[in-house]
Image: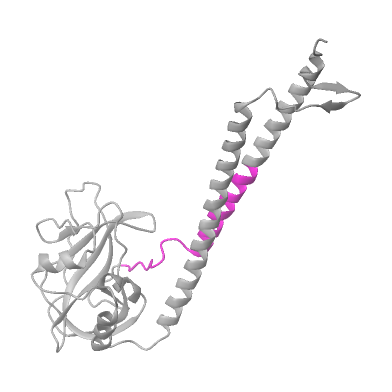
């Protein structure tokens, strides 16, 4: 008895489909499903990661607000806190604490941190080293932001804070390292352009130890430069917005792939 061809193909009887409508697709169907699941999973995971970052940033924002409301630390308290850290590289965790010191400029040397942006303008953050009295502990003090010249060979000339004793009260921070280059990369001259606030390398460059944090005073004497404060590069709201974008892309992608699958299934059943 000859095998009927109807047992090898899909039949449509009164609108009902018999057999496996995807039997003719084989590996194409499998690859289609794998791509759909893989891409959809990646998009969802990216959205979830952004939500995790948003939660972290919210907690970090609350920590900064709490530190701002605390009394200013003395240099002894700051040093004790730094020494208590399990890793000196974790000095970034001190960002936001208040500090009150009596200090004087060490030299007239100016440091320029490259590749900074403030209100849409590219420029530098300006620093000068101060000596804390009476301990003579050295600390880097931020003087503010200054725009860059169109010609990178031309560095801005900023007058250094003149010699004298100053009471400086402000907040400390440690800038995050550049993931592409974490080294100081100091250029010669005054002002000295640097690429990162690599404090260990900066101490070697200066020839004396400095605290692993930077002080941003509330009011810099003899200076009117603006002082940007960006301890959190991206806010929690930004991360939440990015998460929504990833989830939206996942939903759109899944909808598109579902539509393609249904369209292909209908075309296959009509042919049969």
What is the quadrant of residue 129 in the picture? bottom left
Q: Which residues are magenta?
A: 226-252
Report whether 225 appears left or right of 205: right
Viewer-nearest residue: 263 or 30? 30
What is the quadrant of residue 165 in the picture? bottom left
Residue in the picture at 81% in, 17% down: 6
Most frequent secondary structure within the magenta stretch? helix
Residue lying farthest top?
Answer: 2
Report the number of discs.
Answer: 0
Report whether 253 appears left or right of 186: right
Residue 5 x, y percent position in the rendering: 79, 14
Viewer-nearest residue: 266 or 65? 266
Residue 152 x, y percent position in the rendering: 20, 48
Residue lying farthest front?
Answer: 1
Residue 78 x, y percent position in the rendering: 27, 83
What is the quadrant of residue 15 in the picture? top right
Report whether 14 appears left or right of 50: right
Viewer-nearest residue: 121 or 272? 272
Residue in the picture at 25% in, 73% down: 88
Residue 217 x, y percent position in the rendering: 29, 77
Residue 165 position (above or below residue 153) = below
| Image quadrant containing the N terminus | top right
Residue in the picture at 62% in, 48% down: 248
* Membership of 192 in magenta stretch: no
Viewer-nearest residue: 69 or 244? 244
Residue 54 position (above or below residue 219) = above
């Amino acid at each position: 008895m000859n095998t009927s061809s109807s047992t090898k193909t899909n039949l449509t009887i009164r609108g009902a489909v018999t057999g496996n409508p995807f039997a003719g697709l084989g590996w194409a169907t499998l690859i289609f499903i794998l791509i759909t699941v893989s891409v959809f999973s990646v998009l969802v995971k990216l959205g979830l990661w952004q939500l995790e970052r948003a939660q972290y940033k919210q907690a970090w924002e609350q920590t900064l607000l709490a530190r701002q409301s605390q009394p200013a630390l003395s240099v002894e308290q700051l040093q004790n806190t730094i020494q208590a850290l399990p890793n000196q590289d974790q000095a970034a965790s001190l960002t936001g604490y208040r500090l009150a010191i009596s200090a004087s400029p060490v030299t007239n040397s100016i440091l320029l941190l490259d590749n900074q942006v403030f209100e849409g303008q590219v420029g530098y953050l300006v620093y000068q080293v101060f000596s804390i009295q009476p301990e003579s502990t050295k600390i880097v003090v931020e003087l503010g932001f200054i725009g860059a010249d169109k010609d990178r060979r031309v560095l801005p000339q900023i007058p250094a804070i003149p010699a004298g004793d100053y009471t400086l009260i402000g907040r400390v921070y440690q800038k995050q390292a550049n993931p592409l280059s974490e080294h100081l990369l100091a250029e010669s001259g005054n002002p000295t352009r640097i690429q990162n606030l690599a404090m260990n390398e900066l101490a070697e460059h200066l020839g004396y130890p400095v605290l692993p944090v930077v002080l941003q005073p509330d009011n810099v004497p003899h200076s009117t430069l603006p002082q940007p404060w960006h301890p959190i590069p991206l806010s929690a709201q930004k991360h939440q917005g990015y998460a929504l974008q990833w989830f939206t892309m996942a939903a759109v992608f899944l909808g598109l792939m579902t539509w393609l699958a249904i369209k292909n299934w209908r075309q296959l059943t009509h042919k049969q």
